[in-house]
Image: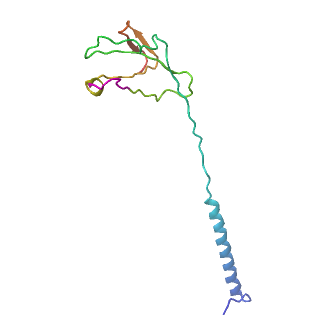
Amino acid sequence: MGLSLKTTTGKVIASLALVGTAAGVAGLGTYGAFTSSTSASAAVGSGTVNIALGTTAATNRLNVAATGIVPGDTIQRAVTLSNAAGNQNLSAVTLTTAATTTSTKLDSDATNGLQVVVDRCSTGWVEAGTAPAYTYTCAGTT
């Protein structure tokens, strides 16, 4: 007892089977078109930072000696950093310090030892005083 294509019922069943098969094949093709992928790539470059200290003057007071310091004293020194030959900005520069001799309470005691503070002025620092007691004020924001 097979399917007879001579009867109307047989023709309808065969047509439905053919349309169903065609729809299934079309669905597979559509599914394949929507599951495609692409590869991504990103370029990563590197930059150069060449930190240059200003000449010895108001833009570089790091070489001014600090003598006669007693507990509670504050010493201010200014330095202007510029990226003379580099192509990156200096917004993420960090400062690290290290004792050059045997470690003591001065460099190991975070509460009572030496403290270093780095400030930035939006308009540039104004220097006053004479060596070695320079002071600095900022008319802008720090």
Q: In front: 92, or 34?
A: 92
Quarter of the image for residue 45 reads top right
Residue at 57% x, 27% y is 87
Residue sticking out furthest to the right: 6
Which quarter of the rendered picture does the C terminus lie within?
A: top left
Q: Position of residue 19 (x, y in %)?
A: 68, 75
Query: Does the magenta portion include 84?
Result: no
Residue at 59% x, 43% y is 42
Q: In front: 106, or 30?
A: 106
Residue sticking out furthest to the front: 102
Quarter of the image for residue 96 reads top left
Which quarter of the rendered picture does the N terminus lie within?
A: bottom right
Relative to 12, is 126 above or below?
Answer: above
Relative to 118, is 59 above or below?
Answer: above
Residue sticking out furthest to the top: 130
Residue at 46% x, 28% y is 93
Q: Is residue 111 left or right of 16 when viewed as pictured?
A: left
Q: Position of residue 52 (x, y in %)?
A: 51, 20
Relative to 129, is 142 above or below?
Answer: below
Q: In front: 63, or 73?
A: 63
Q: Position of residue 65 (x, y in %)?
A: 37, 12
Region of the chain picked out in magenta, as a range: 97-104
Quarter of the image for residue 74 reads top left
**Colour approach in the figure:** rainbow
Q: Is residue 16 left or right of 121 when viewed as pictured?
A: right
Secondary structure predominantly adopted by residues drawn in magenta = loop
Q: Position of residue 118 (x, y in %)?
A: 39, 22
